[in-house]
Image: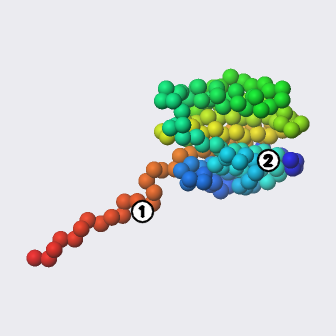
Amino acid sequence: MRLGRDEAGSSKAGKVLASKSGKFQLTLPAGWREATGLNEEADIQAMSAAGDMYVVVISEGKEDFADDMTLDQITTLSRDNMMANLRAPEATEPAALEVGGRPARQYELRGAVEGVNLAYINTTVETPKNYHHIAAWTLPSRFDKNRGTLQEVTRSFREVGAQQPGANTSTPPSRPSP
């Protein structure tokens, strides 16, 4: 893990980073960049230039879950899974909010991974066809300074419009000349 200067004051938007499918996106703060290797299941991965803040988005299709599964139940499953993979985990209860105009649940989580203590802001967002797990994290010693930036990145999550540019460009058939 690369540690460097704190970027908590960085609030100017940088580039938009789209998911592999092109259906979802995050707007990265200035100085952030796309990353690789943070999570092999992630649809979006990014990090701060200083290497002290990270975010991943993992999207799961609703068709993979029972029809009666709720956002709260999915959040609990995700939270329990994260806690099982951390040493000495501590988590807050999920709180309701909206991200990109969609219902979401968010909680904070702390624990150790491979001997490094981490502090997360985890958010589950429900869209019509998917559940999206957004994990944003930093070191606990930098959490208070970086919290605003991690929240900003999380809140920038958006579903890209269903109609693609040029999707309705057909012209009516021409009439035969009299």
Q: Position of residue 85 (x, y in %)?
A: 77, 32
Residue at coordinates 67% horizontally, 46% vertically from top-left? 41
Residue 60 rendering spot, x and y as whole percentages: 58, 40
Is residue 10 visible to us here? no
Identified at 74% across, 53% down, the residue is 36
Among the 4 quarters of the image, the one containing residue 106: top right
The dot on residue 178 is: none
At a point 58% along the width and 32% down the height, the residue shown is 104
Q: How many marks?
A: 2
Q: Earlier in the sequence, mark 2 or mark 1?
A: 2
Above/below status of 17 relative to 58: below
- Does 76 sit left or right of 8 as displayed? left
Callout 1 amino acid: Gly
What element does badge 1 sit on?
loop
Residue annotated with mark 2 = 7
Question: In the image, what residue type sits under mark 2?
Answer: Glu
| CA separation in Å, label 2 and label 1 | 39 Å
What colouring method underlies this structural image?
rainbow
> Does residue 169 sit above or below 60 in this rendering?
below
Q: Which residue is mark 1?
A: 166
Q: Is residue 46 visible?
A: yes
